Image (spheres, rainbow, N blue to C red):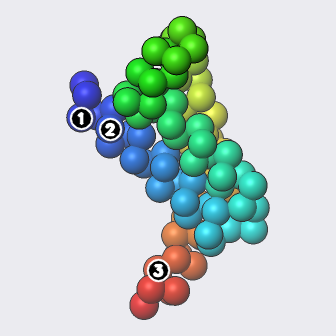
Amino acid sequence: MRIAGWIFAILILAIGLINTFWGNDPGYGIFVILTSLVFFKPATNYLTTKTGIVIPVWVKVILALLILWTAFGVAELFDKIELMVKDFA
């Protein structure tokens, strides 16, 4: 399960980076990048040790679904990936 968590965290981070640099709303991309920290275990461990705040799994699931929904639906992720590929080609 740890590997799946890391893969998902990197996926969310990549969505944020793509939206920041190839989108028309860099604020949304930065928000997703910062939100992706919730899915990285070292970041959540650091948050827990410094503040005592523990983020429940159900909050992470809802947040992940919301990010995926907005990225694939509203933010037009596939169009932005196409722009990114054209820039690197």
- Say if 87 sits above or below 5 in the image: below
- Say if 10 sits above or below 55 in the image: below
User: As drawn, is 57 to the left or to the right of 69?
Assistant: left
Give the residue at the far front of this rendering: 50
Front in this rendered view, residue 24 or 70: 24
Q: Secondary structure at mark 2?
A: helix
Disc 2 target residue: 6
Specify the amino acid type for callout 1.
Answer: Ile
Disc 1 target residue: 3
Report the number of numbered marks.
3
User: Does label 3 or label 1 sit earlier along the sequence?
Assistant: 1
Which percent across, then down, holds residue 63? 59, 29
Which percent across, then down, holds residue 58? 52, 14
Which percent across, then down, holds residue 56? 51, 11
User: As drawn, is 13 to the left or to the right of 67?
Assistant: left
Specify the amino acid type for callout 3.
Answer: Val
Specify the amino acid type for callout 2.
Answer: Trp
Q: Looking at the image, can residue 58 be seen?
A: no
